[in-house]
Image (spheres, grey):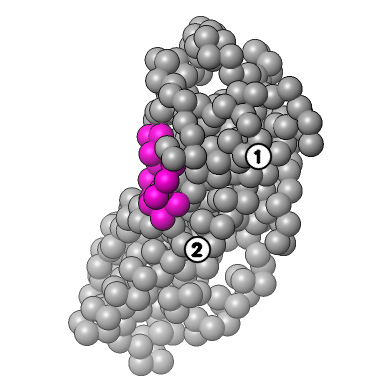
Amino acid sequence: MTSKLNKIGVLTSGGDSPGMNAAVRAVVRSAEFHNIHCYGIYKGFEGLISDEIKKLNARSVKNIVNKGGTILKSARCLEFRTKEGRLKAKNNLDKYGINSLVVIGGNGSLLGGKIFEEEHGVKVVGIPGTIDNDLAGTRSTLGYDTALNTAVDAIDKIRDTAISHNRLFFIEVMGKGSGHIALNAGIGAGAEEVLIPEKNMGIDRLLKSLKHSEQSGKSSSIIVVSEGDKIGDNVFKFSSYIEKNFPHYETRVSILGHIQRGGSPSCFDRVLASRMGVFAVDCLLENKSKLMVGIIGDQIITVPIDDALKGGQDIDKDLVRVCDIISI
């Protein structure tokens, strides 16, 4: 594998996700393995503009594979959305002689990297870092597995109190417009119903399901709601509505929130991040860019960033069927 590549930058952008540090570590150490200088860019694209760029080596990233968050920090940068901001970023990279970037983040971060390459010729390879699992071309994004396990653990604990007090809990999980966390966590935690934006079950069906649960003798229930679901927009109002129409239930709402983005990454996410980081550097060495690294089956692959941004993965219809059957 030969290339004139001798300097690359790595940044994390957008919402943090478990596994970002492991990916940064893999990029830095892979670069050093190939005798390439690697520079960490702090605070995402904002750091490109404000010149927060620091040379890293293998020792700079020791003891971070197990850490949540990102040592490079992250930010959403409005200025980078302007041509003037992106020109400042290019001028700063030129000062260091950096012409290749590994961008770790979600769809907004990958879009920013793609535009940057098109305008200024900086070669960009993306690593999908988001708990939402909402990018096409990969079966799993960095942090999704960890967030899923965090959600299941939290729901298990909430079920204990739901059973103790005969309560109906609405538990909102993250996901934006994607129901992957809600569907998988709902099945894994044994929820009675799962509400996701990809499958609008409607209020009438939910009411019918609750009535059936009541008649079958259930004294407590767990309903997992994706934040992108229509009911998720008014989950507190809906909880009050249920309590008025089903006096059998005492309802509560629990929004898991940012707990899903933190914590030590799972083994799966650590290994995935390591594989993706090494593969991203390989792509740059082979002069390949404007790509996102992904995983299909057990194979690390690449897809054009344009394709990755066309829409998230379809919800597995078999999983939806499983959920419907085992939640009776």
As drawn, the label of residue 280 is 1
Q: How far across and down, in percent of the image, does residue 23 sit?
A: 53, 45
The amino acid on which the numbered mark 1 sits, given as a three-letter code, is: Ala
Which residue lies at the image location 38% right of the left edge and 39% below the top edge?
A: 71
Q: Mark 2 points at which residue?
A: 267
As drawn, the label of residue 312 is none
Q: Which element is circle 1 on?
A: helix
**Residue 305 magenta-highlighted:** no
The amino acid on which the numbered mark 2 sits, given as a three-letter code, is: Cys
Question: Between 170 and 68, which is closer to the camera in this rendering?
Answer: 68
Which residue lies at the image location 52% right of the left edge and 68% below the top edge?
A: 184
Q: Is residue 210 visible?
A: yes
Q: Quadrant of residue 206?
A: bottom left
Label 2 near label 1: C-beta < 8 Å?
no
- Is 201 left, or right, of 62 in this rendering? right
Q: Quadrant of the N terminus?
A: top right
**Residue 62 magenta-highlighted:** yes
- Is 226 left, or right, of 114 in this rendering? left
Number of on-image labels: 2
